[in-house]
Amino acid sequence: MYASESARAASASESRYRITVPIAPARNARVIALDARAAAVARRISDGPWANARFYTCEATRGGGPADEFLLYGLDGVPATLDDTLRGTDVVVVIGTDDSGGTRAAAIGNACSARAITTAGVVLGDGFEADDAVAALRPHARVLLLSADESDAFELLMALRV
């Protein structure tokens, strides 16, 4: 009788092929909240076991500029440009809860695509209040999660090893 593949894989002779060190986290993850409710979610999950993740909120510029111009703010309130935020970044996770951030989502997605940065999106809500954000992220996000449960945002960050 032959041992199954699972039994052979679990044998002592095969143990030399096992990876025994933890998988390294993404070096520089950025989490960007597109709207006020998303910012509240980002603040709650920012205390997680993240390696080098930085969390930002996103606000439209004041002064009549184009709709896709915006400023990012770290959770400590320090402003940052999108260009500076993306420099050296490996993965960007965008969180949205409504359509107010649709144009910002598109601008972030375009900037990440131009720099070959992996992009993921989490759209939280119970209906179709974020259709524009979903449509804006869809062409750019390798992972796009639509959920009513904010704990899914935490789980996505864990899965991406940020």
Image: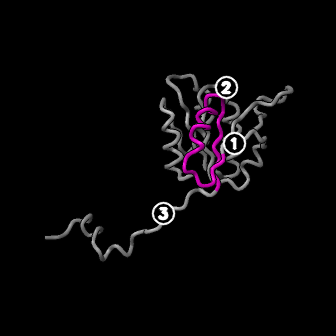
Q: Is residue 7 above or below residue 117?
A: below
**SS at mark 2 in the image:** helix
Range of the magenta residues?
28-54
**Label 3: which residue?**
22
- Residue 83 percent coordinates (x, y): 77, 47
Applied colour scheme: one colour
Q: Secondary structure at mark 3?
A: loop
Q: Residue tagged by mark 2?
A: 100
Residue 58, horizontal then vertical, whole percent: 71, 35
Circle 1/circle 3 CB separation < 8 Å: no
**Camera-side mark, 2 or 1:** 2
Q: Quadrant of residue 76?
A: top right
Q: Secondary structure at mark 1?
A: helix
Toward the right, the furthest residue is 63
Q: Which of the pair 145/56 is nearer the observer?
A: 56
Q: CA distance from mark 3 to mark 2?
A: 39 Å
* Residue 107 horizontal side relative to residue 63, left or right: left
* Amino acid type at mark 1: Asn
Q: What's the mark number on residue 23?
A: none
Q: Which residue is mark 1?
A: 110
